[in-house]
Image (tube, rainbow, N blue to C red):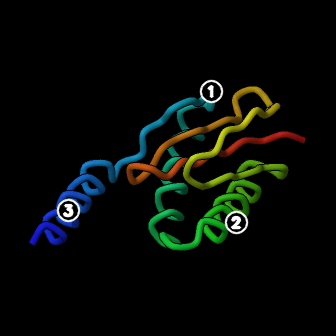
Amino acid sequence: MADAESKKEEADYKRVHSFPLIRQTDMPEEMRVEAMELCVTACEKFSTNNESAAKMIKEAMDKKFGSSWHVVIGEGFGFEITHEVKNLLYLYFGGSLAVCVWKCS
């Protein structure tokens, strides 16, 4: 009984946090909205494979906004990066998943 209850609480927690929460960005609004939608789509499509989700985001950003995009997806990581101005997006998705997208050439 307690096991089923804890699974229900976890499902409720994930449902509450099913929207992306932007932690840091300096992108223009149009680019930010598009990148955010792309991150959500990729993370939902490849919910068990962060590498495939990152590859999908990178390839789409390269195609739409020019090359040299980088993507990191995971839980519990830290980073220090150098990026082009107005080309950084760092967000949380689904409660504990973090996505960092940036461009540097």
* Lateral position of residue 5 relative to residue 42, left or right: left
Q: Nearer the viewer, residue 70 or 3?
A: 3
Q: Residue beneath label 1, please?
A: 26
Please, what secondary structure does the residue beneath circle 2 have? helix
Q: Disc number at residue 52?
A: none
Q: Which amino acid does label 1 sit on?
A: Asp
User: How many numbered circles are shown?
Assistant: 3
Are discs 1 and 3 less than 8 Å apart at CB?
Answer: no
* Lateral position of residue 23 relative to residue 68, left or right: left
Q: Distance between the residues labelled 1 and 3?
A: 38 Å
Q: Residue beneath label 2, please?
A: 55
Q: Nearer the viewer, residue 13 or 103?
A: 13
Q: Which amino acid does label 2 sit on?
A: Lys
Coordinates of residue 35 in the picture (x, y in percent): 57, 48
Q: Distance between the residues labelled 3 and 2?
A: 33 Å
* Lateral position of residue 50 relative to residue 66, left or right: left
Which quadrant of the rendered structure holds the N terminus? bottom left
Q: Is residue 45 above or below residue 101?
A: below
Coordinates of residue 96 in the picture (x, y in percent): 44, 50
Q: Residue at 54% of width from left, 55% of height from top?
A: 39
Q: Residue beneath label 3, please?
A: 6
Q: Residue at 73% of width from left, 48% of height from top?
A: 65
Please, what secondary structure does the residue beneath circle 1 have? loop
Q: Which of marks 3 and 2 is nearer the N terminus?
A: 3
Q: What residue type is labelled 3?
A: Ser
Q: Which of 64 and 27 is in front in this view?
A: 27
